[in-house]
Amino acid sequence: MTLDKLADLTGSSKSYIWELENKNPPRPSAEKLAKIAEQLETTIEFLLDEGDELSQEDAADARFYRQYRKMDSATKAKVRQIIKLWDEDT
């Protein structure tokens, strides 16, 4: 994702996003961090690189869950059925 696109999606300026990426230490608001994390499909913890390092697998799980939450009920039911079938095979 480009700086321009992320800035647009989060209601920020391109220079602000650049500063967050390059300034040490960045000082974004919690609200801005949440918007950026959502658009990048990751967690705030991953962006801040705090505590235990978030694995790529954990970040992928977080992205999947955010996508799942946005699904309609019928699609969620299909996903749950696929997971159930997968579990039966293992």
Image (spheres, rainbow, N blue to C red):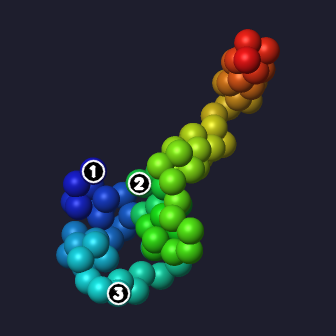
**Residue at mark 1 to residue at mark 2: CA–CA distance:** 8 Å
Q: Earlier in the sequence, mark 1 or mark 2?
A: 1
Residue 68 x %, y %: 63, 38
Dot 2 amino acid type: Leu
Q: Residue at x 22, y 60 (%)?
A: 4
**Residue at mark 1 to residue at mark 3: CA–CA distance:** 22 Å
Residue 75 placement: quadrant: top right
**Residue at mark 2 to residue at mark 3: CA–CA distance:** 20 Å
Q: Is residue 65 left or right of residue 87?
A: left
Give residue 1's mark: 1
Residue under pointer 2: 40
Residue 55 x %, y %: 51, 54
Q: Residue at x 28, y 72 (%)?
A: 21
Point out the frontmost of discs 2 and 3. 3
Residue 28 x %, y %: 42, 81
Q: Mark 1 near mark 2, Cβ–Cβ under 8 Å?
A: yes
- In terms of secondary structure, where does tag 2 sit? loop
The foreground one among 12 and 62 is 62
Q: Mark 2 near mark 3, Cβ–Cβ under 8 Å?
A: no
